[in-house]
Image (cartoon, helix red, strand yellow):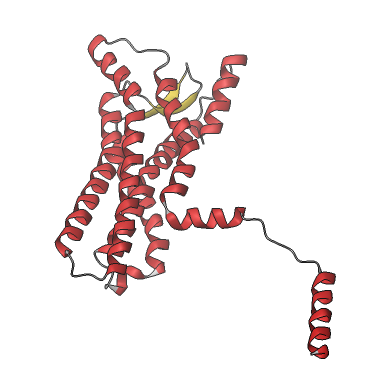
Amino acid sequence: MLISMNIRSILGDLYNQSFDSSWCIFSGYLASVLFSMLYMNFLNQAFYRLIRIVYSQNRRFQSLKLYVILPIIEIIILACILLSVLIPLNGVAYLPNDHFCYATFTNIPSILSGAVIAYVCPFCCISFIYMYITRFINRQGTIQTLVIRQRQFRDLLIMRRILIIVSLLLILGIPAMTLIFMFIITGEESPLLVRIALFPVSISQMGLSVALLFSIRQLKNIVLNLRKPSTVTPVNLVVQGTVQMRTITGTQ
């Protein structure tokens, strides 16, 4: 989606092409929903750690079907809530200076409502889960066995890393929020507002896969195992070694 938006922006700058169409508006709403799912992925990771630590004895939460169906349900619910807010406010429009369709940052009610739904709510939920898990582990004391406590602290460490990553993503939005507040105060829109706002998003998208990879131990181990060179023993050496062993055995 980001590649498509960047291509349209480059073509518009070079050849002054216009991409204003109903499909462009649809792609703008779709991009808003997909970008919002970014934080929901981190929330799913936090929810999984909550189940592993606090509700590890509840078999209903251990079902694989739950974690397969959960993202689908989240997309449907998030799309319904976000679109029910953005569409009545005309939140997505064609941006002539940028040559693609996206949420208009000068539409203050729309952009603030979308930010609360897509960013603030997931961040608050992740923070609440982290504090709840921390409080639960401290309450357990020495009741749990050493193996269980070690697993719980590993999950808590992953939760801490997830919270740090989400906090960094929120920090990347500070330049855009600064320009938005300047627009509210002065009433003048910066022509580079959208590009400055989306540039950190592009940077974060490139680093998120790597960040998630190293924050989740299981994924990290899988990748490290793939990088290990596999030793291939030639067949003739195996046969030769077998013959030598038989010769030694026969001699004895």
Is 5 above or below relative to 69?
Answer: above
In the displayed structure image, the side of residue 182 where residue 21 appears, left or right: right
Q: Please say whether residue 80 is visible from this viewpoint.
A: no
From what the image shows, is residue 243 above or below residue 68? Answer: below
| x and y, in percent, of residue 178 in the image | 29, 19
Report if residue 191 is visible in the image. yes
Q: Does 60 appear above or below 120?
A: below
104 vs 18, nearest the viewer = 104
The quarter in which the C terminus is drawn is: bottom right
Q: Count numbered badges in the picture.
A: 0
- Image location of residue 40, percent across then percent down: 35, 47
Whether residue 176 sits left or right of residue 4 in the image: it is: left
Residue 133, quarter of the rendered image? bottom left
> Residue visible at 27% across and 14% down?
182
Residue 13, image x and y in percent? Answer: 57, 15
Q: Residue at x 20, y 50 (%)?
A: 131
Q: Nearer the viewer, residue 140 or 67?
A: 140
Determine whether 44 is above or below 23 in the image.
below
In this rendering, position of residue 158 left or right of residue 199: left
Q: Quadrant of residue 63?
A: bottom left
